[in-house]
Amino acid sequence: DQQVKQNSPSLSVQEGRISILNCDYTNSMFDYFLWYKKYPAEGPTFLISISSIKDKNEDGRFTVFLNKSAKHLSLHIVPSQPGDSAVYFCAASESTGNQFYFGTGTSLTVIP
Amino acid sequence: NAGVTQTPKFQVLKTGQSMTLQCAQDMNHNSMYWYRQDPGMGLRLIYYSASEGTTDKGEVPNGYNVSRLNKREFSLRLESAAPSQTSVYFCASVQGSYEQYFGPGTRLTVT
């Protein structure tokens, strides 16, 4: 059973606008969450993370929000740029464990 | 500092053939992982090694074996390849509970 879900397979956004990518999880023991970006024919690369002790983490144009009660996190990209076009995966783990659980990914297209 | 390297980049096998995918990291990370990525399925964990000398099954281990040769190297073996193992395979490493570093992937086709 999928413990981390990304229900939107794709998203298109105009350049300069905000991109919002969503992720839901079912395991209440998860306490560390990450977003990865993946270009075609490359491995995923780490983008931003958040610990469950926070509800927001910001890094430049990228902000991750965590709503623990709803078991939901989102990635905001502002402003979106054409180079942001990629597949974005969210992932979750228990800080005491060794496994990471990935969502199915959202393909973001930023239209110039 | 090459990060995580994988060989080969591409491979075509016939059903029943065997092969080993190689992975090495130069970041002195304790934990290493093998994932497969299939369309609409995201990244699914095959096996992982939390430290040198240990290996554990992930979500989809059937048909695979692994070896943690030393701290740097973690190999994935397909003993008798099946078309269902056609996929892109990624190796990753991590120190602690922080972000994983991924290799560039191996694209495997089994005919």
Image (cartoon, rainbow, N blue to C red):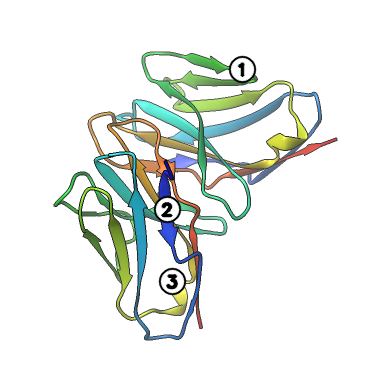
Residue at left offset 34%, top offset 25%: A31
Task: Determine contact: label 2, label 1, CB under 8 Å.
Answer: no
Towards the viewer: A79 or A11: A79
Q: What is the distance, in whole Å, between disc 2 and disc 1 at their CAs?
A: 29 Å
Q: Amino acid at mark 3?
A: Gln
Q: What residue is pinned by disc 1? A: A60
How packed mark 3 is, by other alpha carbons closer than 10 Å (few <14, some 14-19, many 20 or more), is some
The image quadrant of residue B69 is: bottom left
Return the disc, 2 or 3, that comes first in the chain's sequence. 2
Residue B82 left/right relative to A56: left
Q: Which residue occupies the extreme right position in the image? A: A112
Q: What is the distance, in whole Å, between disc 1 and disc 3 at their CAs?
A: 39 Å
Q: What is the distance, in whole Å, between disc 2 and disc 3 at their CAs?
A: 21 Å
* Tag 3 subunit: B
Q: What residue is pinned by disc 3? A: B85
On-image quarter of the C terminus of chain A: top right
> In this rendering, is residue B21 above or below B26?
below
Towards the viewer: A3 or A96: A96
> In this rendering, is residue B65 above or below A66?
below
Q: Say if residue A26 shows up in the picture.
A: no
Q: Amino acid at mark 1?
A: Gly
* Tag 1 subunit: A
The image quadrant of residue A3 is: top left
Residue at left offset 73%, top offset 23%: A18
How packed mark 1 is, by other alpha carbons closer than 10 Å (few <14, some 14-19, many 20 or more), is few
Q: Nearer the viewer, mark 2 or mark 1?
A: 2
Residue at left offset 47%, top offset 19%: A67
Q: What residue is pinned by disc 2? A: B5
* Tag 2 subunit: B
Residue at left offset 62%, top offset 47%: A39
Towards the viewer: A68 or B57: B57
Q: Which residue occupies the extreme front position in the image? A: B1
